Image (cartoon, coloured by chain):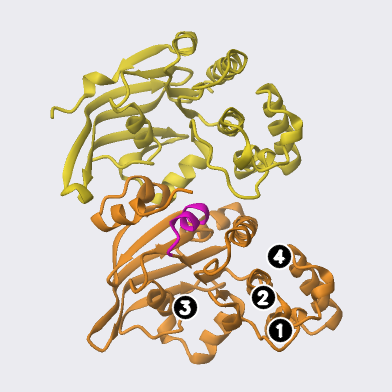
Chain colours: A yellow, B orange
Amino acid sequence: MTNTPKTKVLVSDLAKSFKMHLRDGLEIPVVSGVNFSVSAGECVVLGGPSGSGKSSILKMIYANYRCQKGQILITDGDEIVNVADATPRRIIRLRETTIGYVSQFLRAIPRVPALTLVAEPLMAQGIAEDEAFERAGNLLSRLNVPERLWQLPPATFSGGEQQRVNIARGFIAHYPILLLDEPTASLDAANRAVVVELVEEKKTQGVAMVGILHDHDVRDAIADRIIDVTSFASAA
Amino acid sequence: MSLDIQNSEDLPLLQVSNTTKLYGGRIGCKDVSFDLYPGEVLAIVGESGSGKTTLLNCLATRLTPTSGSVNYRNRMGQMRNLYEMSEAERRMLMRTDWGFVHQHPADGLRMTVSAGANVGERLMAVGARHYGNIRDTATDWLGRVEIAEDRIDDDPRAFSGGMRQRLQIARNLVTAPRLVFMDEPTGGLDVSVQARLLDLLRGLVADLGLSVIIVTHDLAVARLLSHRILVMRHGHVIESGLTDQVLDDPQESYTQLLVSSILQP
C-alpha cells in the first residue's frame, strides 16, 4: 500500500442539468460547481434534502449519468481516469475492478439465484466459482438472508430481502472506491448495524467511499466528513 | 503470453466506417461508424423501420452496403475489408468465425434434418469427420441450451418456438465463433420462454467471451445483455454510449421518448 496515492476521487467544477425534450426542451438544472475529493480509507457523506442532487452526483461518478461540465478524476492503479470523458470500455473496466456501487434497488434477473447474483462481482474479478459462492453465502448469512432463499431468484423476495441481497452484491468484492446510495434505507436495526460494520471493514482496507445516508445514526457512525450539496445548487 | 492477450483485446475485432445502404433514393442506414472489441456486446435499438436490421445485414455480409467499409480482424490478426474478400472467404467466415441468430428459427435451421444434425452440420463444415465425436459434441451443446438428450434425433419441426430458438443458438455456437450477430433473438417468444433464453445467452456470452451485435426493439433485453448501445432512427445513429447511461440519462429527444414509452409491469 506504500505507493498508493491518497486521493482516490477528485471532482472539480462538475455541473449537471436535464433537458426534457418531451417538455418542449425544458432545462432542469441540478447541480453546478461541484468540488470535492475523497481519500483512501475515508467515507464522505453527501448531505442535503431530497432533490438537491445527491444521487445525481453519485451517478455521475459511476458514469451512469453524463455531466455537462467539469471533471471526475478516479485513481485506477497507476492511472488517473477522467470518468467525464472516458470511453465506454474504460468505464466497464473501472466498474469491474475499481468502482463499486451499492444501490437501494435490486435489478433482479429472471432465473438467476440470489447466491449467484451476489457471487457475480467476485467472479468478474477472476475469483474461482467455489470461493465466490462460499463468500457470497457467508455475507448473505451475516445480512440475515435465510439459507433457504439462496437458490431462488430474488424477484419474489420481500423489499427488505431484495435490498439485503443487493447490499451483499455491492459489498462482496474489493473495489478501491465504493459508492453508497442509501444502503440502509428501510433496514431494521440489526441489519443497519451489519452495514455499519461492513463500511468500517472497507475503511480499514483503505477503500474511499462516497455515500448518501438519510439515517442519522448510521451517518454519524460512518461519516468522516459531510458535504452539503445545497451549496452546489444551480442558480435557476 | 498475457501481453499477447492484452494486445489483442486492445484492438478492435470489427471496424465499421461510414457504412451506408440506400434502397434507390430511400435510406436504409446512413454513415454508421463504430468499433467493436473482443468480448463486447453491442445492442442496436430503435423502432421498426429505423434501419437496425439493414445495418446488421450490411455488417454480416448479407447485404452489400452502397458505400463505406467494414473491416474484420481475422484469427491471424489481420484486418480485412469484408467487401474486398472473395465470396469463398466470406462464406468460410460465416461458417467458422461468425454466427447469425435469426429472429425466426426456421430461417437459421434446417427444418427437415434432426436437431443433432443441425448442430453437427456446422462442425462438419469446419472439418470434423468422426461421427462419434460429432454426436457427443452435439449432445453436449443440446444440454447446454437445455434440450433433453432424447430429443437429439427429432427434427425441429417437432420443437416449440423456444426450443427451436435454443437449437439455433447451439448450432451457431458449436464452432466457437468469435462474433455472433443476433436479429431480435427473443422476438415472438412469451415472457417466461424469453427469460430462459436471455439467462442462457447471458451465461454463454460471458463464459465464451463472445463479441455480439444484437438488434432488438426491447430496451430491457438491451439492458440485460449489452455493454454498449446504438440508438437508430430513420437510418441514422442518433445516440450511442454505455448502455445504462443511454437508458438512464438519454440526451436525444427520440431516445427520451423511447425510454419513457416502456411499460412498467
User: What label does residue B145 carry, if any?
Assistant: 4
Q: Chain of mark 3?
A: B
Q: Amino acid at mark 4?
A: Val
Q: Amino acid at mark 2?
A: Arg
Report which residue position mark 1 lands on: B121
Please rate how many residues cluster around mark 2, counting C-alpha atoms within 10 Å: few if below 14, some from 14 to 19, many from 20: many
Viewer-closest of A94 and A184: A184
Gap in angstroms between the C-alphas marked 1 and 3 = 20 Å
Q: Amino acid at mark 1?
A: Glu
Residue A214 drawn at (x, y percent): 42, 17
Of the two numbered discs 3 and 2 in the rendering, the one whose residue sits closer to the viewer: 2
Disc 2 to disc 1: CB gap under 8 Å: yes
Q: Is residue B222 magenta?
A: yes
**Which structural element holds mark 2?**
helix
Gap in angstroms between the C-alphas marked 3 and 2 = 17 Å
Gap in angstroms between the C-alphas marked 2 and 1 = 8 Å
Mark 2 vs mark 1: tell me if same chain. yes
Q: Main secondary structure of the magenta part?
A: helix
